[in-house]
Image (spheres, grey):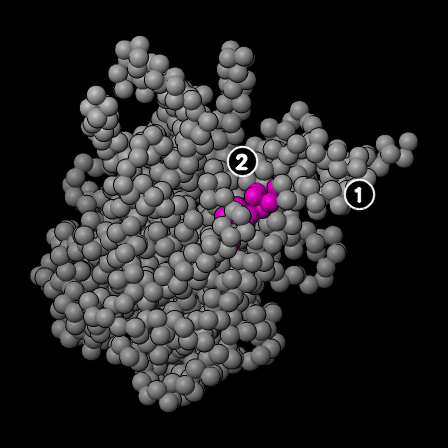
Amino acid sequence: MKKKIMSMALAAVLAGSMLSGCGSSSDSASAGELNIFVWTEYVSQDAIDAFEKDTGIKVNVSTYSSNEDMISKVKSESEGTYDIIQPSDYAIEQLAGQGMLEELDKEKLTNLNNIGESYLDPSYDPGNVYSVPYQGGVAAIAVNTAKVDQEITGYADLFDPSLKGQLVVLDDYRAVIGMTERSMGLSMNETDPDTLSGVEEKLLTLKDNIALYDSDSPKSALISGDCSVGYVWSAEAALAMEENEDIQIVYPTEGAYVFMDNWAIPKGAKHYDAAMEFINYMLSVDAAKMNIEEFPYLSANSKAVEAMGEEYSSNEAKNPPAEVISAGEYVSNLDTDTLAIYDEMWTKLKE
Amino acid sequence: MSRNSKRKAKKARNGIFCGLVYLFLFLPISVIVVNSTNATTSKPYLSWKGFTLDWYVKLFDNTQLLQSFGNTMIIAVVSTLLATIIGTIGAVGIYRYHFRGKGIINGLLYIPVVIPEIVLGISLLTIFSKVNIPRGMLTLILAHVTFSVPFVIFNVRARLSGYDKSIEEASMDLGANRLTTFMRITLPVLAPGIAGGALLAFTLSIDDVIISYFVNGQTKTYPLKVMESIKSGVAPDVNALSTLILIATILLVVLTQSGIFSKNKEHS
Amino acid sequence: MEKAHAKHQWRSNTLPALLTVGPVTLVLVLLVAIPLIYVVVMSFCSIDQYYNVQLQFTLDNYKRLVSANYMKIYAQSILIAFVTTLLCILIGYPFSYIIARTQSRRKKLLYMLVIIPFWTNSLIRIYGWRTFLGTNGWLNTVLQFLHLTKEPLDLLYKQGTTILGMVYCLIPFMILPLYTAIEKLDGSLLEASADLGAKPVVTFIKVILPLTSSGIFSGSIMVFIPCLGYFFVSDILGGGNSDVIGNLIERQFQSGNNWPLGAALSIILIVITLVLVKLYQRMGGDMDSLGV
């Protein structure tokens, strides 16, 4: 009996290792490795494969669903676990403030001139010391017009009780609470505790409408028909629209949640040079095009946007219009006490 | 006559009830198998686009998926081996020897079994983080050994109660030293318990989600890779791999079943 | 003479004892006891503005956790766990009874058929339920095709869906101990009871139930406790709407970035677990029958 078990186990190991051996036979013997930690559904695997082929550097990909997840993991893992991260605007501020980012050697970024002027030298990283912009966008509303009768024009409409159990929203507390604040005409970075208790009241009225929290692929719920309205990243709306003609994107009249994500290198990264090479490659027009095609967000790479042509630049969902961006608001860092209030609100919402 | 038809009715009722339960158990399995043949190629892979077996071939191009499966296999085998050895000798030692702290050890053994996995997971994460052990294969193996050892010990202990020590004494009187006695007398008696514990440890390891989620660092195990896929949409190749694993385990079970029968015949 | 013999016994006993019990002790102390102690310590720590853990004593974490919102979530978790356990018993007991006492030659096969599904990855099976129950999923497609329903049934992302997922994941932990306990039933006792004039219901309540109670108790513990921590089920099927305590803990270690709060939540979970285990022992549960 024991022998049988042993031989079974042995067979299983052989089978397993053969399978995995088959897979990793294309493993290049250390031309180097790179560990990247990026948003889910954000960086094209084709682009990564092309980089691997070109340079022989093996890229290990891990993903996260929110800035908080990323910061948490970077802190809890030992220094140098990740070579590349993609913090959003306020996250760059947070990380740089704690000295957790490496300075970028701009001489190595020969493709930096592909990035549009307006995206450089942002307030969250003056002089682009720690980061270069990648893609950004809007947290917009997606509506399945075949299933929803009423007109939806802004965040406030999401609170309509007739939308009970119909909503898919981002699993991101700053995004959802921020949206509530915008719907009330407040800033997404409100700190006054009294005002915030009013926000909490409004927020909790949304509870019954929310069927699903999903930051990774909210388009799935829209495409599958499980949800008829979504508070989702703009590209998710764009992709849902491609799968189902009835789905349309709505930029809220109150002014939207706007974001810009960036490439950055955490302090103590083990493969700094490879990381710089990777960032430079991602700044190239070819790589940027691959990324935009698969994940159609607002691209900071103006040369790539030109190369994408009319089809992309005229698509309002893929390439949010400039007015929407300027009417929108960016999330910024808040102090721990205020964030504790936000956290409590979020817990109350999710119970 | 009515008694017979009553019995038949009862049997039919029982049959239907069990059938429904089996249906419940196998429903998701059938979804997985069917979805592995979905010809869809666009995320999130929800709509049915026709039947195809292509994904079973494309599966082998998915290096990341295969590697995660390989990782899971290695972790399962290594941790099961370690847990079985540690557990077996531990069970024997606890049973046989009296020492201070025996009660504490016995109490501690119940903790990984009874406590929710998430508590084990985070406690290991915090200690690994404090002591600065980088999370990866090593921590995964350590974690899996931790939750497997008690199961091995309980299974071996079950065989130990009612075990007659006098055989061992006889063996030693006949000149065998402790080690030989252990290997040739004690071990064979404990074998079914050891095998049961090992099998349980292996099963728990390959499907472990919660504990691995916290201590894996960057290493992807198969369950964690599946978790990742669920976030972006499960491609049919993941379904294909699951189907293949299912077929493999069914074959293994069939083999052991026939194997057991022949072994039993020899013994009796 | 006896003294020397005793001394020899002791000396020749320590080394083997150390060798055999040493490794287990090492594992238990280093990987179970010390980490848990560290978690307790951490639950009393605070965090600085950058979410780094400070070794500064505070009761703030616990104060937060006994507030009304959190109490609500504990209650919801316990309710979900309770319903799940109840359903597992109601479905699992008759099922185990029929299978364990069947005279069929295929008994072993029937037993294996219960275990085989659970050798497929649990996450992907839970995801299978999502595909099955979705608005355009299998169930709705079939029901609408057969004209049994006009509108698709909204079954996903509800508390009930989470419970379904939990029952699905945990029912084997109920079935297996029940099977073991029921198999040990001596058929002659049941015959005797019938011979003495007891109706089947009475036999069940007075003979079968007490004799198989150990199975029910150990099954219940092995279902109830994990249920409190299975965050992935409520994530995938509940849509993130029906949080259990496990979700709270997971969030503090992920996006919440507040390890001390997560540690305190874990301690609360441990306390709930201990209470349940004490209850189990009080009701006559045998600790050794768990996990075998």
- Residue at x-position 46% and y-position 48%: C123
Callout 1: SS:
loop
Asked if labels 1 and 2 touch by Cβ distance under 8 angstroms, the answer is no
- Calculate the distance from the C-alpha at mark 2 to the C-alpha at mark 1: 37 Å
Q: Which one is nearer the viewer's eye here, B52 or B219?
A: B219
The quarter in which the N terminus of chain C is drawn is: top left
Q: Is residue A129 left or right of residue C164?
A: left
**First-in-chain label (2 vs 1):** 2
Residue A152, position as x, y percentages in the image: 53, 79
Task: Specify the subunit that label 2 lies on.
Answer: C
**Quarter residue A173 falls in:** bottom left
Q: Can residue B51 be found in the magenta stretch?
A: no
Magenta region: C212-225
Amino acid found under the numbered disc labelled 2:
Ile
Q: Is residue A238 above or below residue C12?
A: below
Q: Can residue C221 be found in the magenta stretch?
A: yes
Q: Is residue C165 left or right of residue A280?
A: right
Residue A239, position as x, y percentages in the image: 45, 62
State the residue position of label 2.
C116
